[in-house]
Amino acid sequence: MHPPVRLVAIDMDGTLLPTFTQPSLSPKISTRNVMALRAAQKAGIRLVIATGRRAAYAAPLLNGLGLDTDMPLIASNGAVTCTLGGHAIDCCHISSRIARGLCGLLRPFGAVVFTFDRPGRGELVLEDLEQAHGRIAMWVETNRNVIEVVKPLELALSDGFDPIQGMAAGTIDRMRQADAAIKASEWAAECGTARTEYPARDLSILDLLPWGVSKGRALQRLAANLGIDRNETMAIGDNWNDLQMLEWAGQGIVMANAAVELRTLAKTRGWKQAPSNDNDGVAVILERALAKLAASGSQ
């Protein structure tokens, strides 16, 4: 039997956020989810948002909700950890040498973007805006003010200008092929990957990360700094880029809207299932955790 939870890591897209029904509008966290987040913090449960989004793309959806500004935010699939208020905690980079090699390897598979640790235009760099717009139009429109087009992309990756992460986008089949190509390449020992798949749109995002970087590794470091054991840690997610944090946390929760393969894996790992993101699954799980905490007299 698990002890009462003290730390909860929560994915955003497909988990805390509802399914996008109007691509032209920013998604909003439901009232029930917001109330559950606040109640958990008030009860002393530490929350961390763990997302593939970069911090500047995630924070606006969380600001103004009454959450603690010192709440940790694991962004860029574990490459960056900061607080909601913007205080830096941890950051990793990909060597520009490796990034240049990945450009040539991945160019045939789809749009490639690199994220840099600098505000404003040039935070995101790509070489074909039209190609990216065709696959991830909403992302392009939301981030247009910080996108810089550089062709060829290698010119943005001179020595000393190391990106935080890279991202390739395309169909699910093409991104699985791209992932396999990286694992079979000379860069396999120096670059990690994280896949996020959206079958309904036949869209996949393949994140390119420094070797060993993941949401799970970032969560492990954060828990150690907070003095919280993995058995007191819960992780809630819906996609393959959540796999490492689900595996590390003592209490893994998979959303009902997750891919069938991930939900099948959850059964073999003993992870529980939450209602879907459109049915306030995060709130349901947090409410149960709060009830367990109150019953244990730990509040």
Image (tube, rainbow, N blue to C red):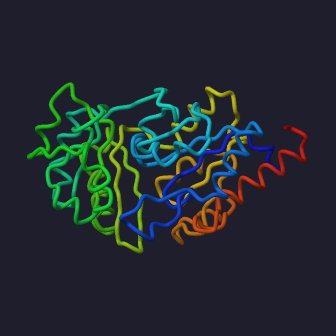
Seen in the image, is 156 located left or right of residue 26? left
Of residues 185 and 49, which is closer to you in this image? Answer: 49
Which corner quadrant of the image does residue 93 belong to? top left
Residue 127, visible in the rendered structure: yes
Residue 290 x, y percent position in the rendering: 79, 49
Above or below, 70 against 17 in this view is: above
Residue 196 x, y percent position in the rendering: 42, 58
Residue that appears at 72% across and 44% down: 40
Residue that appears at 41% across and 48% down: 53
Residue 88 x, y percent position in the rendering: 46, 27
Residue 264, visible in the rendered structure: no
Of residues 292 and 109, which is closer to you in this image? Answer: 292
Residue that appears at 25% across and 31% down: 162
Which corner quadrant of the image does residue 164 belong to? top left
Q: How many marks?
A: 0
Which corner quadrant of the image does residue 48 belong to? top right
